[in-house]
Amino acid sequence: MTGGQRGPDLGVCYYPEQWPEEKWAEDAARMVVLGLTWVRVAEFAWALIEPEPGRFDWGWLDRAVETLGNAGLKVIMSTPTAAPPKWLVDLYPEILPVGADGHVRKFGARRHYCFSSPVYRREAARIATALAERYGRNPHVHAWQIDNEYGDHDTVHSYSPAAEAAFRDWLRARHGTVEALNEAWGTAFWSMLYTDFAQVQLPNQLVEEPSPTHLVDYLRFSSDQVVSFNRMQAEILRRLSPGRPITHNFMNQNTDFDHHRLGQDIDVASWDVYPLGNLIHGRLPEALKQRHLRTGDPDQPGFNHDLYRGVGRGRVWVMEQQPGPVNWAAQNVAPMDGMVRLWSWLAFAHGCEMVSYFRWRQAPFAQEQFHTGLLLPDSTPDQAFHEVAQVAEEMRAMPEMGPRGRAEVALVLDYASRWALAALPQGRNFNPSHHALDFYAALRRHGVDLDIIGPETDLTGYRLVVAPDLVIVPEGFVQRLAASGAKAVFGPRSGSKTADMHIPDGLPGGPLRDLIDVRVTRVESLPDWQVETAAMGNRRVTLRRWRETVETGDGVLARFEGGYREGAPAVVGNDRARYLAGLPDAEGLGLVLTDALDWAGVAHLPDLGDLRLARRGGVTFAFNFGPEAVQLAAPEGARFVLGGPVLDPAGVAAWV
Amino acid sequence: MTGGQRGPDLGVCYYPEQWPEEKWAEDAARMVVLGLTWVRVAEFAWALIEPEPGRFDWGWLDRAVETLGNAGLKVIMSTPTAAPPKWLVDLYPEILPVGADGHVRKFGARRHYCFSSPVYRREAARIATALAERYGRNPHVHAWQIDNEYGDHDTVHSYSPAAEAAFRDWLRARHGTVEALNEAWGTAFWSMLYTDFAQVQLPNQLVEEPSPTHLVDYLRFSSDQVVSFNRMQAEILRRLSPGRPITHNFMNQNTDFDHHRLGQDIDVASWDVYPLGNLIHGRLPEALKQRHLRTGDPDQPGFNHDLYRGVGRGRVWVMEQQPGPVNWAAQNVAPMDGMVRLWSWLAFAHGCEMVSYFRWRQAPFAQEQFHTGLLLPDSTPDQAFHEVAQVAEEMRAMPEMGPRGRAEVALVLDYASRWALAALPQGRNFNPSHHALDFYAALRRHGVDLDIIGPETDLTGYRLVVAPDLVIVPEGFVQRLAASGAKAVFGPRSGSKTADMHIPDGLPGGPLRDLIDVRVTRVESLPDWQVETAAMGNRRVTLRRWRETVETGDGVLARFEGGYREGAPAVVGNDRARYLAGLPDAEGLGLVLTDALDWAGVAHLPDLGDLRLARRGGVTFAFNFGPEAVQLAAPEGARFVLGGPVLDPAGVAAWV
Amino acid sequence: MTGGQRGPDLGVCYYPEQWPEEKWAEDAARMVVLGLTWVRVAEFAWALIEPEPGRFDWGWLDRAVETLGNAGLKVIMSTPTAAPPKWLVDLYPEILPVGADGHVRKFGARRHYCFSSPVYRREAARIATALAERYGRNPHVHAWQIDNEYGDHDTVHSYSPAAEAAFRDWLRARHGTVEALNEAWGTAFWSMLYTDFAQVQLPNQLVEEPSPTHLVDYLRFSSDQVVSFNRMQAEILRRLSPGRPITHNFMNQNTDFDHHRLGQDIDVASWDVYPLGNLIHGRLPEALKQRHLRTGDPDQPGFNHDLYRGVGRGRVWVMEQQPGPVNWAAQNVAPMDGMVRLWSWLAFAHGCEMVSYFRWRQAPFAQEQFHTGLLLPDSTPDQAFHEVAQVAEEMRAMPEMGPRGRAEVALVLDYASRWALAALPQGRNFNPSHHALDFYAALRRHGVDLDIIGPETDLTGYRLVVAPDLVIVPEGFVQRLAASGAKAVFGPRSGSKTADMHIPDGLPGGPLRDLIDVRVTRVESLPDWQVETAAMGNRRVTLRRWRETVETGDGVLARFEGGYREGAPAVVGNDRARYLAGLPDAEGLGLVLTDALDWAGVAHLPDLGDLRLARRGGVTFAFNFGPEAVQLAAPEGARFVLGGPVLDPAGVAAWV
């Protein structure tokens, strides 16, 4: 889980096909002067590479690679499968995805393919092979990106005939017999029995919700289709382009496929960092959205750096760093000047090896013309250009940071559990991606570094493992946790479903009962306006949206107050594990989790407010996400290698 | 309209097909020990009874009935037509319903059939006949339920080819000639004339709203399809299972079909009582939702007991009583401990003969696994089990209650009027089901018992008839009302449409003008934030959402204030009837309706707040729906037969 | 741009086909007595004129025209193409429009046709020809209306096969070659290249948004289809009914087609005035909606009078004036008594030649039965009848008003710019129709009369030209503006796109840089709750929803305050033009625009609050849209020709 073994480097996303060829050499030269090392190309270039079926036009891309490489840049070549050409769609209309409304989704943008289409898989393999054969051993090509942002535009889930056929095969493989499927799905419930896999349909357009197992099986199947589609390309690239690392650029917060599993098939995980749109659409209450309007949620980028560092088994890149206002959010706000620099250093502090900006020059046409770049459309530098120049200069002065070490605290993010919650949220205001970030933020506000891990990740060495929503506890997890010696905190609903989406024998808690005595006899979801409170010693924790009634023989650390089941346990625990019978709000999580840090022997700081600290190797970084200057409490003897003890808004400092 | 001639009894919903056969006998024995008498089975068992076309597997159900019956339970057998098997859907895809979006709604949950499909009617008759032949004279089978919750998941309205064909036949029968249809629908309005019934289409996916008469005819037709589908099954059961009462379990608040009419074809009306989800989705302002979060709207269950007592012509059961948190609401909150007992006694107080809990044991799989039962999934008792035990014990100590007598006050609920309002709401915030409950609650808060009746119900004996929204006044209603001697209060919009959805000759008020001189010259719908006020003597009534200008030669009891048409009548009346020219809010309705009670000579109490009283025979019941204990003002000499004079939250008391 | 050369007259919309023939003569006589001159007929009468294919039933309409004409009324005859008969739809189902969801929109209301259907164009021409041949030279027919309310019910945009075919032709004509289309649409962006026009599809049901140029081309195409459909009918009428002016009744606020262009093909622009529904759905904050609940937005009717006066090149009618509550808004409120009179005089003050009321008598059936008229359904006068009588009497006493002169201030409304903003709003809360009305209102609140003009309108004679959102600056506009000598104020985003929806070379500002030195280097959209402020001298302007960073060598009139880019220009200008780098709110616009009025030498008054003034010829009118009486500050020596110096709510006065 350590990160940052190579680099740090800077890079950029570049689209030679969008600019006159006479600009390429100058662009490349300016990139190098700016301090960039990497350049990603070609992820949407299929129709330009193969303008007609079987007729390839390699010339322009050959020359672009040559130009960029000769300037001294390392090229990240992409397979262009995120956007099949119109002629391909016209030849094989069956490759188009079908929406949950049963309508075919049309050509004219991107990601217009169904992962289950055998024809599209064949064609994707064909174009990936062609690219890999052409550039696999090109000396300028140093890495590969497969496809682009799987899951964008809600494209993991297709309801096409191809998906239906593949789903039936998948079910056959998973359940073996239709009787086993009936048992797993509980089809006796509403006379939903099947006598043949061929009877099963995709779970859209029903009269009422399907069996949650039917739905979760479909979500798992859809994830597996992405993973196998990606693996198919990875195998081609490995064979034809040996020694070049393979990456995919993930979209943060997307949970439509299992990023941990896909991560097994690539060498470096990269992700696309757009904090301001995430703020607008994100978890924070309005007052905090206002406070952080131009800095973004202080914890959203860090969360994802820590997540993808795990997905990439230690290796993480930023493939697309927001350089200014973008185009896709409900509102597209400008970052405060300095934030591009801050986000860049934040990435390095969290172990990223490389930060690549999207994009070199703002496009004056097509869908994303409001998306800024390092250059304005007229090729003059935009604000980010100057900030990147500053980062490049600062990097030269920065001592060797060393790798980001394993953290003392791990937070578990399990995609299968997320699908379980999506299938049975039980409250329309139940939003697990917000909850996980809330847990993470509560720890980060107290200066704690974390790893974000999958449920299969080795737990050795952690002092504390936090599982906000591990609904389905994988086989062996409890044993590995016990063996690791780590203490654990489980959020509500942990252990509440089996792999087949049943309530476990012996009630929720399920396999966790080997660690902690919890038997959940009642759960309830609550409207946003309902506030529950619990007394934890002489402090009060407020909880919202979810409450459980738990029976335990272990200790009770906090008890509910108020007119309903007063005194019932709100937090229970023993010397190995703690369990939360509700969802504390931000302040409550601060109380509960700092108490757990003390218990686990993990050092922490008083609430940092808008400040965030991150340690990499021997260097400690500080970042100010707030509107006021902050006086840093650097330890005595600290030597500043970046900035100084007073941190302005959007300011960055580092000391050793 | 009297209720409670038999029982009271307790019962439960049980699904032998969902549990291993070895559990059945123990389950049955525990039911009996708990004090249950009735058990409902098989309403979703078609695929288990007939796993393949024409091959019946009766064995398991025979044994289940035998086991339950031998333990001493009376079985309510169900026709399983709410969930046709997959093989039937595959054989006859045309039985599936079609949504308003034109898409076929798929198999995979329940209620996946179109009421108009002749094939499905034939198949439903076939399976009902098979059940009735098998169990019609079984000594353990004491009653029948037909289908399950007509109207759930918005399934009354189908837009299938079968529905279109049936609609044309229905129109031919209703209008006789296409000229009459043109006249009724006002097709001259936008050149919408028809020359043949075969030209008429279902009123979905139009460019703009259809003629309201087109829409209302479709709503009536759809209701008639449900009624005739049910009647078809009722006739089979009557023929093959003589002497067993037939019921259907209605969903409260559903107004997609005419419950009064369907009630004519059954022997007992039953309904499914889920107060907490109804609170979340219901009429109360947020402050009251918070107050009653775990007790539910104090008037929603009573309203429906009183309604279905009328629908069942005096005989009403609770078929499914919420036992704890459920699964289907926006949020699913836990009832306060004691509420299951309270709701049970409330049902008996309102004349129910039987209260059956849904369900015996919480299912650990499939769609409703968050729906609690009397037992937890591991067969240990959940909270409701203990409360039911208490009710059973209290029932044994309760003196004979006698029947629930006819009330002095009747509230009219007319389904055809609701469809009229749905077709022409005239304000997007106009919600007649909320209004009717508001009228009911205002009376109940003052201790008044009510009957809820249909527009065809005999009015003899009532002192006061309240019609919150009798838009279409049926022929003869005014004459029967006059003959009854009852005084009447009409809400706004009463008498505002003819049966063909026209404005009556002589303007709204229409047939009511034989009772009261109202000529409505203007109506207006108002945004939620607009408050109108009226002076009623020296008291002020606030009104919202709807206001009318009324001309009258009768008395004016309240006059509008403010800058618009100051002094215009807000409440008018003579010695027989009163008419409201707007929608008072809760407090205003309290003023207007208690004044009407005085006028009609109906005794009432000061505002009871969270307390509700209900009388059955000689017993008076008291229920506390609030968060604080209440001191009861029982009459002198009252003898408590349940509880005592101090009523805790969720408390129940009764005296004679 | 002058208006009101003829009339003023009063009129009414009448539907003989909806009433028994024996009522016609009496109705006509009452119209004349009331003071009406014009009567519109037949716009929904196709099925009554041609009940079967090719069989015409002219008798009833002949007699109706004769009856009305003989009574002394001038008939406005209509082509009935807004509602084709069922038999036509059954013969040619392909004439039905297709929604963006891909579903055919069904018969049963109105506007159920696709503008691109060649069959429907042929049939529309056939019925228009038949009407024109029958009535083109009828002495009672004095004018024509073509169709009815183009764009109502979202019917400009159809996604039918006919539309797709026509779109391809349109693209071929616009772009010439597919290479040019690829260049314009920027298809290199996401591999969206086309090799043949036949590959292009309509921009619905894509995976993600299409190229904005693809979308804007579709919006332009759709507008052109309306214009050519209308022109086709206009040519028939001109040929067969010489000397009769042709009109179309526009729906205010509809921007789905270019009203200026359509206006070129008609003789008089008319529009339909429904202020109260517009208030409910409109721009004002809730407090002002409450204040104007029964008077409507004080500026919405004036805006549209001024707009359609321009569209009609000086000639404007009100074809449908709201007479009381209507039926189509979210809530349908009653106007304060007096408002129908106020709106009538407001229309005349803004240069209207004729005000026609919709409708003579409220229909007691079909879709619009809640829409009031001059008469109630029982033929007794409704409130509006009396107000119209008063207007008619007052008109007789009014001195000759003369034409409405050219205003000193013009506001530019460019439909192509609106489509540009619809295609790339960049903020979900960006609503240009609200912004334009905000600019207009800020000027009107200070007593300024305006013309609303298209981008091709002659600018000669204006002192100030205000362009709130001229995103695409048409060729020659800047030159014409400079030549006119008018000063100009441009809202943000002006000049930000080329005709092909690209960012202009040299960045936004684009062609405006020939007038003013603005180079927009950054734009951002902001959430509703975000407030930016700027200092303008010692006054503070608050801005919302949109902010830009502008580089300029010209003067800076206001500078942003606060933590982000403090001191950056908020308003810049030179002696010819000013540019706003954000969207001031109502108060801020008052400051910015009155300052501009001073600069341009246009006289203005202090904020008028609820009062509005309008000048026509030598007459000055005053209108009170507020809830309190207002004391007028008429100039010394003013002689009142209507009302007096104290203006009650809904009051009107006029002086010379």
Image (spheres, coloured by chain):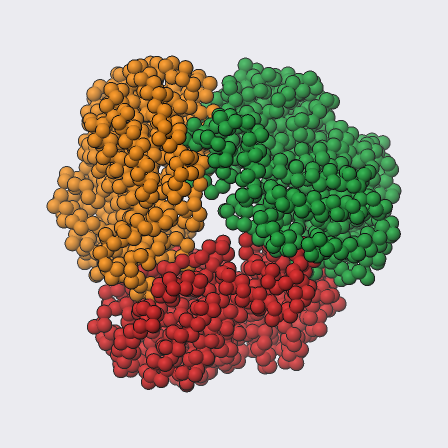
Chain colours: A orange, B red, C green
Residue under the image location 65 percent in, 18 percent down = C479
Q: Position of residue A517 (x, y in %)?
A: 19, 56
Q: Is residue A5 visible?
A: no
- Is residue B459 shown to the viewer in this render? yes
Q: Is residue A166 left or right of residue B446?
A: left
On screen, residue A550 above or below C164: below
Q: Quadrant of the C terminus of chain A?
A: top left
Quadrant assignment, res C354: top right
* A109 over B589 or under it: above or below: above
Q: Is residue B479 above or below residue A298?
A: below
- Is C322 left, or right, of B620 in this rendering? right
Q: Closer to the camera, A4 or A87?
A: A87
**Which residue occupies 60% across, 50% down?**
C92
At which x and y percent is residue B602? 58, 76
Residue at 24% across, 74% down: B24
Q: In front: C575, or B245? A: B245
Query: Residue B221: x and y, percent?
Result: 55, 67
Q: Residue furthest left?
A: A483
C616 sits to left or right of B639: right
**Nearer-the-camera pick, B251 or C590:** B251
Q: Please tell me in which quadrant of the rendered image residue A192 appears.
A: bottom left
Q: Quadrant of the N terminus of chain A?
A: top left
Judge left or right: residue A343 versus residue B158.
left
Q: Residue at x 85, y 50 (%)?
A: C69
Q: Position of residue C324 (x, y in %)?
A: 71, 52
- Name the residue nearer the viewer: C448 or A310: A310
Q: How many marks?
A: 0
